[in-house]
Image (cartoon, rainbow, N blue to C red):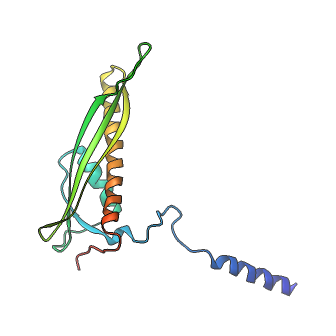
Amino acid sequence: MIRQTIAAALLASLLGAGCSFSPVYSDGSPINAMSLAFNLGSPSSRIEQIIYEDLSFRFATSTAPKTPKLTVIASTTSRTIAMATNGPVSDPYRATVTATATATYEGKVIFEARRSASADYTASGQVLADNSAAIDAQERAAKAVAESLRLAIFAQFPTHVLTAN
């Protein structure tokens, strides 16, 4: 009985040795997103606010003088998607958000990327519903652009730590 208990404990410890304690939903990247610190610019539109907000959740923010400044300029467009229809249906549209992110450090550009993302929506002729659908599509596209910019930043600075040191 004692041998079985010891064998079970030994087996459990060997199985547990291969485990680690890390967040289940982490992206597994080798660097911590919080090791990248930026002084974020100010948004001038709702779309830029969504992008800045998403980036502020992903990176550390700092106003220290030696922290790189990250600015984002975003624009949005909507257009009709040309599709053949067989009767009275809702009109399909596509909202596209394009953003350019620029990081400067001591007056020099150290990073610049331009990303675009689109999201589809339909318009039925009801003004309130059409406006809500367009805003929702723009916000979804803005979040996709923010994610793409985050990945571009990680690609540019895979091992660098940008802090106020």
Image location (x, y in percent) of residue 119? 36, 38
- Whether residue 87 sits left or right of residue 73 in the image: it is right
Quarter that holds the N terminus: bottom right
Q: Please state the horizontal and vertical placement of residue 81, each as a whole percent of the image.
A: 34, 27
Q: Residue at x 27, y 73 (%)?
A: 162
Q: Residue 29, located in which quarter of the rendered image?
A: bottom left
User: In the rendering, at what x and y percent does residue 43 appear?
Assistant: 20, 51
To which quarter of the image does residue 129 belong? Answer: top left
Q: What's the residue at 31%, 55% (across, down)?
A: 149
Q: Position of residue 83 (x, y in %)?
A: 38, 23
Mark count: 0
Instruction: Look at the picture and state if 135 lies above or below 46.
Output: above
- Please state, as top left, top right, bottom left or bottom right, where the C terminus lies in the image: bottom left
Which residue in the rendered view is the most extreme toward the right?
Answer: 1
Q: Nearer the viewer, residue 128 or 54?
A: 54
User: Which residue: 28% across, 42% down?
Assistant: 97
Residue at the far left in the pictured view: 107
The residue shown at (24%, 44%) is 46
Q: In the picture shown, does residue 48 fall above or below 110?
A: above
